[in-house]
Image (cartoon, rainbow, N blue to C red):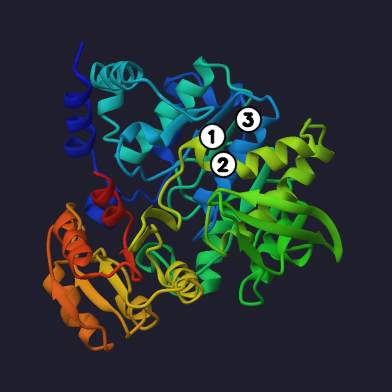
Amino acid sequence: MTSYKHTLDFLYTRLPMYQRTGPAAYKNTLDNTLALDQFFGHPHKEFKTIHVGGTNGKGSSSHLLASVLQEAGYQVGLYTSPHLIDFRERIKINGEMIPEEQVVAFVDQFRQSKELQQLEPSFFEITVAMAFDYFRNQQVDVAIVEVGLGGRLDSTNIVDPELALITNISLDHTALLGNTIEQIAAEKAGIIKPHVPVVISESNHAYNFVFEAVAHEKHSPISFADQEFQAGYSMLLPEGKQLFNFQQNGELVFPNLKMDLLGNYQQKNASGVLKALELLTQQGWEIPRSAIYEGFSNASSNTGLRGRWEVVGNNPLMVCDTAHNEAGLKAVVAQMHATPWKQLHIVLGMVNDKNLDLALAILPKQANYYFTQASIPRALPAADLAKQAAAFGLHGEVVSPVSEAVAKAQAQAEAEDLIYIGGSTFVVADYFS
């Protein structure tokens, strides 16, 4: 049998991969996905699904849902992207990654089929097919399926879910999804299915009407979670978790709700998840309150999620976060301002197909920057990033690779300082590697 390493080499180098090469790997049709699905016997029809889309927060929301349903006693598949360290992070059941031999066997089956190779599928199309085949074979009760990019034309959009959850919309991947909030919302709304409830975590007058129109057309009940669920503040506990008191329509319904996913922005994700769980319960799912409390408190440990305002060091405080667009970075900057520090150090790297101006404009000027680049072809050269950042009053050193940039920041920081590592999922991935 082929080795796992050689299998990964094939996946990463022989198939078009958006995470590495960008828009060239994007497919604007579901034809390949449907053909793969048919070849493997329509595996996605053998288990229930919950479909999660949006611009920011869909990863955290997917992991929260998986954690709660796992605590409720269900066998839960979880498909997410991208991964940080190991490809197998994308495909999990009850927090356990798909075994290496299962990855190898699936790819070998693909490579031995002339019919499948003639399709010339992308990395993402093959990965979705692998996930659905694995979930079917392992007889999961439900799979939480995170959209990869967009929604309408995403390979995951062949599922007929119990519920769709859309976190929020902001400008990202504009070259593929559209240049306006309305256009992007229309693409994300493509996961709304006829008569299937849809929850919007974070409402916004700029795009609410888009979702309302699609939901009305498809006779799908729609809820805007943040109009029902609110938590006025969060408190960081000594155990390293944050605590929320959630109200629903002004009534305290989830007091002392702990989360091991940090960052004030998680309350927006939590609102959407709480509303989704309420609707699932109304559909007959058995989800006791204890499962919600335990699932929120242990989301990271249950599912293995990393890189969401994750504290990776102390004295100085070191934090990494995978936020990589304007809206995500705006939430991160707000978290920086809510965190005490004497001096701020930012290890920053970005990819070359983003609107950098929107992101750079909101980053703090009063910080020492270490401009770096991740080890992927899409990474913007660190010197180019430094040049563009200077136009926004952001100054510092050019240091690559990521490990050296972090080491430089650590050498220059004092115990009371904050070191932030981010700007791209792949910068965080390189740090963990």
**Type of amino acid at the residue the image marks with label 1:** Asn
Number of the front mark, 1 or 3: 1
Identify the element where label 3 is drawn. helix
User: Is 222 on the left-hand or right-hand side of 141?
Assistant: right
**Type of amino acid at the residue the image marks with label 3:** Gln
Q: Vertically, is 138 above or below 15?
A: above
**Type of amino acid at the residue the image marks with label 2:** Ala
Which of 91/124 is in front? Answer: 91
The residue carrying mark 3 is 70
Label 3: how many Cα within 10 Å (few below 14, some 14–19, many 20+)? many
- Which circle marks residue 299 in the picture? 2
Contact? badges 1 and 3 (CB < 8 Å) = yes
Residue at the extreme right of the image, as rendered: 251
- Which circle marks residue 172 in the picture? none
Which of 361/172 is in front? Answer: 361
Q: Position of residue 105 (x, y in %)?
A: 31, 15
Identify the element where label 1 is drawn. helix
Label 1: how many Cα within 10 Å (few below 14, some 14–19, many 20+)? many
Q: Vertically, is 293 above or below 99?
A: below
Q: CA distance from mark 1 to mark 3?
A: 8 Å
Identify the element where label 2 is drawn. helix
Contact? badges 1 and 2 (CB < 8 Å) = yes
Q: Residue at x 59, y 55 (%)?
A: 237
Q: Residue at x 71, y 46 (%)?
A: 194
The residue carrying mark 1 is 302
User: Is 239 on the left-hand or right-hand side of 247?
Assistant: left
Q: CA distance from mark 3 to mark 2?
A: 10 Å
Q: Quadrant of residue 362?
A: bottom left
Number of the front mark, 3 or 2: 2
